[in-house]
Image (spheres, helix red, strand yellow):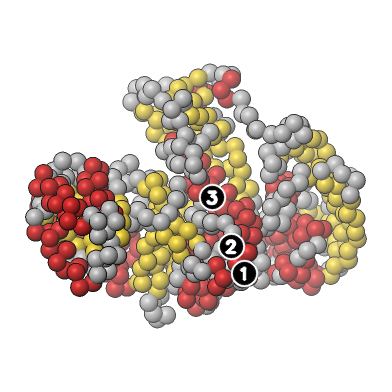
Amino acid sequence: MILLLYSERKRIEIGITEIQSEMEPDFWNVLARKSDVINGWTYGCMRVRNTTKTRENFAKIESEYDSLTSYRIRSLTRFTNYVEEGDFFYIFNKAHVELAEQLTALEVLKQNRTNQLNWIMTHNHYFNLFSRLSFEFDVIAFGINGVEETIGELNKDLRTCRFCNKSGRERFRHVSHAIPEAIGNKQLICAEECDECNEKLKEIEENFVHLMDFRRAMYKVRRKDKSYCTTVNGENYTISPDDEGNPILYIKQSTVTDGKSDKYLIKFNHTHPVVDQDIYRALVKIAIDLMPAEKLGYFKDTIKWIRGETDYPIHDALPSVLFKCLPNKDMHEQPMVYLLFRKSDSDNWPYCTALLHTTDVIYQYVIPYATNDNGRYKYDSELEIYRKKMEQYFGGDWEYQQYFSWWYSYIWNYWEVPRNQPNIHILPDSDSIFIQKKGLTDDEDKEYEYNMFEISDFSYKNLHINEERALIRRLAGQINPGERCIMTLAHFSISINIKNGTGNAFFKSKINLNKSTENLSTTIDFCITDMMRIINNPKFVTGDTFGNLIYNIWRMMSQEIDSRIGQKLGIANQFAFLSGITPYSIISHAIVDLIMPNGCIVKTSFKSLVE
């Protein structure tokens, strides 16, 4: 028998395997008969008030079953310490409770529970809502019971990695968290993610972690074994821990406008760049880690996309990710995930949708490229009716966020800041607290200045196009999708020339890594067919450093296509990806500071060779 206990502050699971199935009804009756039970709808669910009567009954139960349960039954009384006197909590028999009852309890516990009539109406509303949800979807919830859950094969000898399909006990030496520990996940573990994939895919997960940096710090989200808040340096703020590890927010004076309101609404600008599409990939990876193994066959193309191995054209579409902030009372220290699977292919909505609750926000997103979606649901226009349906279950006021681009972007947060709070300080912009420390080694703590790229302009039918600075930012920031960039890119030059009126491209490259004498130099002739093959099939260049760099160049260029120019030339399908920026914008010289993966600042010059 397994008991689940839910209160506003805590959720626990008590495993009492010593109580056999034939003993369960008697035990349940003893639990309910003398406790202060308000409602007991089914054999699997009861609502109990925390009163002297309840605690005395729990104490008697502990005394009777203590030795039989190896003292685990004592968790009953300890749990009441997390419930206010007179407030109520839920007890479920895990084997007999319905998911709709559990989800209803989570919602009801957020509400004002002093009025009995209001409580009954609230309960009935959510129970009917989640019952209908379970009727329309196969719903699986993770992280709601307050205990560690391991998804997948427990026997290491029988495991196969969900991402690379490799097996072997030696590949599964470490614990793979389905959601990054850095955003508070202590309980959701994927047994079927090998050490190699776990390490490689951290690169995309870090983008989502940085997206959450501000909240991780302000809510003091626990990460690994660290109980103090993380330090975050932004463009106009710094968050750092005090002596007790609690967050202190320092805001630059120039950010704050004068006013009589008791709160400031401030846009906090982050300085750490993220790759938009990697955020989406990280969110989808969570769903792949958690879903039942029998569902994975529908997501082979999705997994290729997560690994950066997709055969899909890189200009393929992705729907928006939906996002909203929840009331402060609705906080989730341990992230929770709902996976909703379509029950019938005749239903006009995506096969799988995920909802991620973490801190005070919730993300709703479609799992793309499911084979039984048949190429549908990549555009928001295809999801309008479906999203209205989802509003019935999860409310409205969703914000649409685009994570399609491969470009780097910078994060910002709007935040209401109360005046006169002891943990919030508004300081002059010149204050030393705003001097950002990168924490680099002596060898890394330098500013390198190189002409990173000297790029010939290329032409097609007298249309002149230059490279764009963000292309190089992408290349410096992440050389090969899914692989860790462990070396500082000290110098890299490449010339590209496309002959006027032909489909031939010539590349010349010389690469120096970490200022070493090891150089890679090659010349490759490509026809247009070969270039399309590189873009659509990364396996064509796997294992070749230069090839991977070239692949990234063309992938970034494809994101910057000006479709109107392509249509004018009648080459949208074949040559559109060759555009770097809008052809009418010619950069003759630009200097940009790049932040390398190791934190090193690189001052980069871009020079066009156009006379």
Q: In the depicted view, which residue is nearer to us: 288 or 525?
A: 288
With respect to residue 270, does 470 lie above or below? below
Residue carrying label 1: 168
Q: Quadrant of the C terminus?
A: top right
Q: 422 and 5: which one is in front?
A: 5
Of the pair 187 and 69, the residue shown nearer to us: 69
Which amino acid type is shown beneath numbered disc 3?
Answer: Phe
- Identify the residue at image location x=63%, y=29%: 437
Label 2, label 3: how far apart the Cα atoms are: 24 Å
Residue tagged 3: 208
Could you tell me residue 580's position as x and y percent? 73, 54
In the rendering, at what x and y percent does residue 9 appear?
28, 45
> Helix, strand, or loop for circle 1?
loop
Against 71, is 377 above or below?
below
In the picture, measured across the screen, residue 555 lies left or right of residue 130, that is right
Measured in 3D between alpha carbons, the distance from the residue under mark 1 to the one under mark 2, in whole angstroms, is: 7 Å
Q: Earlier in the sequence, mark 2 or mark 3?
A: 2
Tell me if 541 is positioned left or right of 73 in this view: right
Other-residue count near label 2 (Cα within 10 Å), few / some / many at <14 / 14–19 / ≥20:
many
Q: Amino acid at mark 2?
A: Phe
Q: Is residue 244 above or below residue 218?
A: above
Name the residue: 85% across, 41% down: 515
Determine whether the residue tagged by mark 3 lies in a helix, strand or loop.
helix
For residue 126, side relative to residue 531 (left or right): left
Which residue is at the front of the view, 189 or 214?
189
In the image, 141: left or right of 376?
left
The reply to whether callout 1 and callout 2 are in contact (CB within 8 Å) is yes
Sequence order check: which comes first, mark 1 or mark 3? 1
Rendered position, 116 above or below 290? above
Q: Which residue is mark 2?
A: 172
Element type where label 2 sits in the image: loop
